[in-house]
Amino acid sequence: MSLKNTSDRVVGVIGAGSFGSAIANILSAKSKVLIYTRDEEKAEVIRTTKESKGHVFNDNVAPTTDLEYLANTCEIIFPIVASSGFRDMMQNLSPFLHPYHILIHGTKGLDYKMPFADNVDFSFSRENVHTMSEVIKDESVVVRVGCLAGPNLAREMADEQPAATVVASHFDEVIKVGQQLLRNNRFQVYGNNDLIGIELAGVLKNIIAIASGALSGLGLGENAKGLLISRGMVEMIYLGEALGGNMKAFVGLAGIGDLVATCNSPLSRNFSVGFRLAKGETLDQILGSMEEVAEGINTVKIAKKLAEFHNVKAPITQTLYKVLYENLTVEEGLAYLMKYPFNVDIAFI
């Protein structure tokens, strides 16, 4: 697929949150962009002010509240909405999609089909949990699917600071399209064919980012954070491989790169959740004040159950679950992890 005449191409973005707005802004340097929001008031604000979530758009960006219009206008679509609403969004979009569409999502979360309640006993296996690329294929006729993952803090992207991402897909054509549309002199775009591995890397690092925020909230230093990040990476690889990813996905930009960025930045929503927990706020208080979703909160719940089902040791995930949902304090969680019997540094190479 050639993108030489990108100025005539209209690219779609679904979701006008921080990251969706950042991607729309980058795309608009080369292409006309339709950005979808369900909120007519928000669409009007974008239309009149050319701004969203701190991102200033040029005239190439136009808002829409009509999914059918977006799908009929755009062959390439970037869905970037919270995982909790992703399947519903795809069900609404699906009637207007065709096999010629390309979808490259930017959502770092997981979807589950079964009723989710702590007092309900059911088989919680990988078969019941889906990445967003799997949801796209579940709900539509689209074949050419990809994802974005990497150290992509939206605030820094809005400030045009140097950054990079990975476009992952089983299709080289999708990777090439993503690179041509997004790459510029301040935004590097790499490719990877391990779609599931890259998705899982982006998802699982959010757990470690919450834990890192908690360490910072306790006022602990870089030694503690280095310990957490290294053990967190090991845990991500063990769990990621059990869920169908390849280790190589976790040691690249979408794994280590994203992990380091989100474990060290208050700009990360997940980091902020952990920080605020350590400062004494409850999860309900934190959730009630957040404008956008911290995907790691729900990921902790899903990953904990998956680790148990697949018999994977995931002490950070399991301890964080107790902090979030079983009233364990951050200090008690840290004390438990410091006593956990890690006898081998790594055993997967």
Image: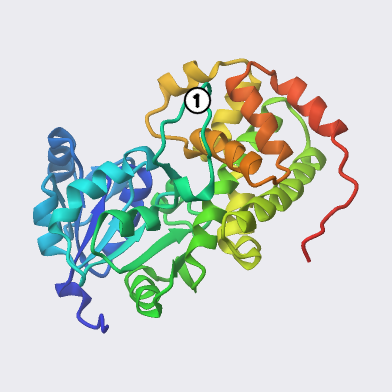
Q: Relative to residue 102, is residue 216 drawn left or right?
A: right
Q: How is the image coloured?
A: rainbow
Residue 288 in the image, given as x and y percentages of width and height = 41, 19
Give the labeled residue for mark 1: 120
Q: In this figure, what is the number of numbered marks?
A: 1
Q: Quadrant of the N terminus?
A: bottom left
Residue 40 in the image, given as x and y percentages of width and height = 12, 36
Residue 285 in the image, given as x and y percentages of width and height = 48, 16
Residue at screen point 18% across, 39% down: 38
The type of residue carrying mark 1 is: Val
Q: Relative to residue 257, is residue 156 drawn left or right?
A: left
Rate crowding at label 1 as few (under 14), some (14 to 19) or many (20 or more) other CA atoms within 10 Å.
few
- Residue 226 in the image: above or below residue 321: below
Residue 308 in the image, given as x and y percentages of width and height = 65, 39
Residue 342 picture quarter:
top right
The one nearer the camera, 5 or 316, is 316
Residue at screen point 33% across, 75% down: 177
Which residue lies most toward the front here? Answer: 122
The one nearer the camera, 117 or 35, is 117
Q: Relative to residue 244, is residue 54 drawn left or right?
A: left
Residue at screen point 82% across, 56% down: 346
- Residue 317 in the image: above or below residue 332: below
Q: Is residue 164 visible?
A: no
Residue 84 picture quarter:
top left
Q: Is residue 95 visible?
A: yes
Which type of secondary structure does the marked residue at label 1 adopt? Answer: loop
- Residue 259 in the image: above or below residue 76: above
Residue at screen point 45% across, 23% down: 287
